Image: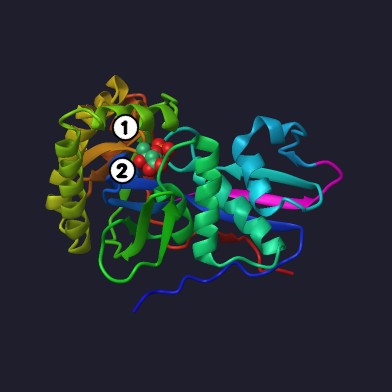
Amino acid sequence: MTEALPPIPPGTLPIAARAPGKCIVFGEHAVVHGAPELLFAIDLETQVFVRPATTTQLNGDVDAVPRHPYFSRALASVWADGPPIDVRAVSRIPRAAGLGSSAAFVAALVAALGSATGGIDRPTLARRSFQVERGAQGVGSPGDTTAVVGGGFLAVNGGPGAPLWTVEDGARQWEVRRVTDPGWVWVVAHSGIPRSTADAVRSVGERLARPDGPSLLAQFREVAEAGLRAVERADRSEVAELLSRNQQLLREVGVSHPRIEELLRAAAPAADGAKLTGAGAGGSIVALPAPGKETELVRRLARAGGLPFVVRPAPEGAGLLEPPR
Ligand code: PMV
């Protein structure tokens, strides 16, 4: 049976909403080209507070509309005829780190504004959030926005059973399915190197357009499909092995970074497996700690100059912080 995710109910301003960040386990970049991706919502979140105002503003910035493409596109998408609003956003998700800070901001804001305009069902919230992110970024897949709207573990273009929803963009269509959480604790660590998702996606696109591109994409697909099956059967050693294979492919398409490689080396003695997560070229790593070595792993990553977080899958996707009035 397909799980029915609850809609965002109608409410009136002021409204507070939240959305989790995300961590990609397998398949970043390749998902943009239609291959499978496995990712989960993490228990670091962004909260937005929306109330009526005389001038539209974001965190006190009255010039946010021209300056902040995610904000302006979200307003254009769901608040085109709405009155001025004051939006405050707070987040524990590091920015430009590959952990879904922009997707969480967009999904929380669209959830709040969707509530204020009569409520919004979850597939529509996922599609709108993707359109906003895609419009602001210019490239990319619906993976990040899907994870933060759906919560828990999700597969894009793979996985068992009927899709929760599909997202289309021109000729491409992505299907989203629920994957069972194996119940593990994960560690992510930000390298401190900010980067542009759009630049990384474009450079991988150029790399995959070369003669060996199709064979590389086939390998990404194979690793993600095997990874999905391994996570479904909670096979830790297989997942660990596939994390390393996925990292090798990401190196080959040019999105690792010397700081990422340093963090991976620092993690190795305390991790079953690790790889970069997100667009790479800086950003973050995800590691599966060796059982009992979670604290050692965090210490190693911090000593190597990373910003580590122990994360668990957040079962709930974007939603209101309080019941609607
Ligand atoms: O923006 P990031 O670092 O979370 O990267 C998202 C993952 C990509 O596959 C590289 C891009 C996408 O839109 O799927």
Q: How many marks?
A: 2
Query: Tag 1: Cα neighbours inside 10 Å, few (<14), some, or many (≥20)?
Result: some
Residue 90 in the figure: left or right of residue 27: right
Q: Quadrant of the N terminus?
A: bottom left
Q: CB of mark 1 within 8 Å of CB of mark 2?
A: yes
- Dot 1 corresponds to which residue? 205
Picture quarter with ligand 1:
top left
Is 219 drawn above or below residue 248 in the view shown?
A: below
Mark 2 neighbour density, 10 Å: few (under 14) some (14–19) many (20 or more): some
| Dot label at residue 158 | none
Q: Which residue is mark 2?
A: 33
Report the span colored magenta. Answer: 43-55
Residue 146 placement (x, y as % from top left): 44, 55
Three-letter amino acid code of the residue under disc 1? Gly
Q: Residue at x 24, y 45 (%)?
A: 289
Query: How far across and how far down the image is residue 78, in percent?
Result: 66, 54
Local secondary structure at mark 1:
helix
State the residue lying farthest toward the right. Answer: 54
Q: Quadrant of residue 54?
A: top right
Seen from the viewer's position, the closer of residues 315 and 121 is 121
Amino acid at the residue labelled 2: His
**Is residue 213 found inside the magenta-colored segment of the image?**
no
The image shows residue 45 at horizontal and vertical percentages of 52, 49
- The residue at the point 31 percent across, 46 percent down is 31
